[in-house]
Image (cartoon, rainbow, N blue to C red):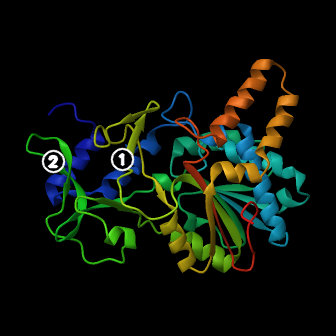
Amino acid sequence: MTDIPPLEAEIRRRIAAAGPMPVSEFMALALTDRRHGYYVTRDPIGARGDFITAPEISQMFGELIGLWMAATWNRMGEPASVRLIELGPGRGTMMADALRAAKVMPGFREAAMLHLVEVSPLLQAQQQQTLAQVPLPMSWHSALSGVPAGPAIVVANEFFDALPVSQAVKRADGWHERRVAISADGALVFAPAAEPLAPMPWPQAVRDAPEDSIFEWRSDPIALELGRRIAREGGAALVVDYGHAKSAIGETLQAVGSHAYADVLRAPGSVDLTAHVDFEALARDIEAMGAKAFGPIAQAEFLQRLGIETRAQRLKAKAATPAAAAAIDSAIARLIGEGERGMGALFKAAAYAHPNLGRPPAFE
């Protein structure tokens, strides 16, 4: 084979040296390899990128997140110092919109210190540009563990779906880890490990799964770190992402490039890889560290509880042209609608809070 991209060549070298590679390792390399990883080498968001996120669809999304953060700070007793932490801030659009809307809560922005968790140098540069006029102290970190201790409000939109997943295939003798191998004709292919995995505390739906089923799970420690931080330091977190409320069998790993689905194993590092969030597993990890979980609820319900339809009407009343008003209608249909293009049902929102905080806003 000729003209193999550098990252694929490295993956093939590792497989040749150590045998078939776990799916989680392949996904981690494809997304975050320091020289050739997808998120390290490009800005993937927007019409010129590979996908579009809710904050880029409309300012309304970020504004409502800002109101959620401010209301959460109020319920925390309005601490004089609070860390605002965003995991995977994209271009910084959501946080810019959120902080503009949060001005309605007196004292909130004065108490806030902004911490952005980002692994991409390109996106960090974009975030610095977007947030250049924000009058808050801010810093960047490569991991949540690098953020200083203290009461925190954490937000994560389309972050957990990009964390690597492990996969297993059900066989007659148990679950076998799914790996990436090189076929006889030289192609990258999925292949189950020869030996079954050691028994694990699988959810009931997984234990009862029929043969040839596929199960995905995440073992990234960030969920445990998030739960530990909230339980120990105080505060709350909001996660908005696409996924399922209960642990279930089925493969959701997918590749997207130029706003279209692509082959997961083709040209690693050149396409985005994601998998649905298992909100039941996420809650289990966070609650194991002492925090409380709420939800998930559909994104449509979450945004409606925060008043997105009222906000849309106000924006339309100020729209300069009929085309601008129509764009607002299109945006709200995308954010809370269902169907092929709607995000309202597929995307979900969940909150996690210190046990003494009670139910976070929109989860009452």
Res 69 → quadrant: bottom right
Q: Where is residue 39 in the image (x, y as percent from the top left)?
A: 46, 44
Residue 272 visible in rendering: yes
Q: In this view, does 306 lie to the left or right of 207?
A: right
Identify residue type, mark 1: Ala
Quadrant location, the C terminus: bottom right
Decide if residue 35 is in sight here: no
- Compared to residue 356, the image places residue 275 above or below, namely above
Mark 1, secondary structure of its residue: helix
Q: Residue lying furthest right in this view?
A: 106
- Nearest to the observer: residue 105 or residue 355: 355
Residue at image position (63%, 41%) is 54
Dot 1, how many residues are within 10 Å of its Cα: few (below 14), some (14-19), or many (20+)?
many
Asked if the residue at tag 2 contacts the one at tag 1, i.e. Cβ–Cβ closer than 8 Å, the answer is: no
Residue at image location 50% in from the left, 32% down from the top: 49
Examine the image and state in which quarter residue 167 appears. bottom left
Q: Is residue 166 above or below residue 346?
A: below
- On screen, 16 above or below 188? below
**Tag 2's secondary structure?**
strand
User: Percent x, y for residue 350?
Assistant: 62, 61
Viewer-proximal residue among 219 and 330:
330
- Report the disc number at residue 30: 1
Which residue is at the front of the view, 96 or 7? 96
Q: Which of marks 1 and 2 is in front?
A: 2
Residue drawn at x 27%, y 36% is 5
Amino acid beneath label 2: Ile
- Residue 63 image offset from top left, x and y in percent: 77, 46
Q: Residues within 10 Å of mark 2 (few under 14, many from 20)?
A: some
Query: What residue does disc 2 label?
Result: 182
In the picture, measured across the screen, residue 248 lies left or right of residue 208, that is right
Spot occupied by residue 258 in the image (x, y as percentages of width and height): 45, 30
- Seen from the viewer's position, the closer of residues 348 and 24 is 348
